[in-house]
Image (cartoon, grey):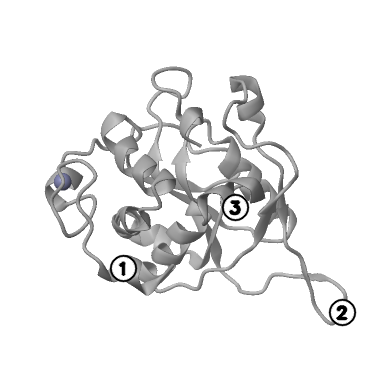
Amino acid sequence: MRLLDLLLPVPCARCGQPPVSPCRNCLATLSESPELPVPAGLRSLTALTSYDERSSRFITEAKYHNARTGLVELARWAARMVPAGVHGDLGLVTWAPTTEKRRRERGFDQGRVIAGVVGRTLGLPTRNLLRRGRGPAQTGRSRSERLRGPEMIARRRVDASGAAAVDRPGGVLIVDDVCTTGATLSAAAAALADAGHEVLHGLVIARTPDPGGGIDPGAWR
Ligand SMILES: [Zn+2]
């Protein structure tokens, strides 16, 4: 994150008004997140908004046109949606990493950007706890492949006794940009649980209303 990204006014990706994207007016037009089951392995999942044509405009703009400021603004609002009871459970924030190929193409990992903002907003440290396996990005995979989720591997720390150490007590908030089937968050949660993290919550910018239909969020990933 460059300081300039935070200081320069950017036009709203929907209405074109500066200084932030989304502007407050357009933020207010976003739909509430759909009520869906919490993905396996998580105690809760908070989403800022539903993933639809309105919200996807901001997320796509941020991810593909290097407009990180839009992601920053959305992440700030998403962090404020975390319920107080969940916040009280948390010790740190991490993210579901994208593939190395995607990170290089885009110049940044959107999950990492979101996690940094969420950590600062919630007053929690951000830790790089996960890495992606060698499998393909979720984009272009069939629904059944996406349901299985990408391979996630926890970065292990070994303490003086040789046991894998959990570096900070308290729950982990795993952030991602969009939750479609929940498979990515579940894969991340499973890897962190194996590494000794017991309390796992999720936070995303947007959640797909009907994971089986509608616009194909895989196309955006
Ligand atoms: Zn606007």
- Residue 64 place in picture, x, y as percent: 43, 44
The answer to whether 50 appears left or right of 157 in the picture is left
Q: Is mark 2 within 8 Å of ligand 1?
A: no
Graded by Cα atoms within 10 Å as few (under 14), some (14 to 19) or many (20 or more), the crowding at tag 2 reads few
Q: Which numbered disc covers residue 93? A: none
- The residue at which mark 1 appears reads as 6
User: Marks 3 and 2, how far apart in space?
Assistant: 37 Å
**Residue 33 in view (yes/no):** no
Label disc, if present, on residue 104 of the rendered structure: 3
Q: Are marks 3 and 2 in contact (CB under 8 Å)?
A: no
Vertical order, 40 against 140 (above or below): below
Q: Residue at x 20, y 41 (%)?
A: 14
Which quarter of the picture shows residue 116? bottom left
Q: Amino acid at mark 2?
A: Ser
From the top left corner, tell me how far across and down residue 128 is, in percent. 61, 65
Q: Nearer the viewer, residue 177 or 191?
A: 177
The answer to whether residue 34 is visible is yes
Q: Which numbered disc flags the more N-terminal residue, 3 or 2?
A: 3
Residue type (three-letter) at the residue carrying disc 3: Arg
Residue type, label 1: Leu
Q: Are marks 3 and 1 in contact (CB under 8 Å)?
A: no
Q: Nearer the viewer, mark 3 or mark 2?
A: 3
Q: Secondary structure at mark 1?
A: helix
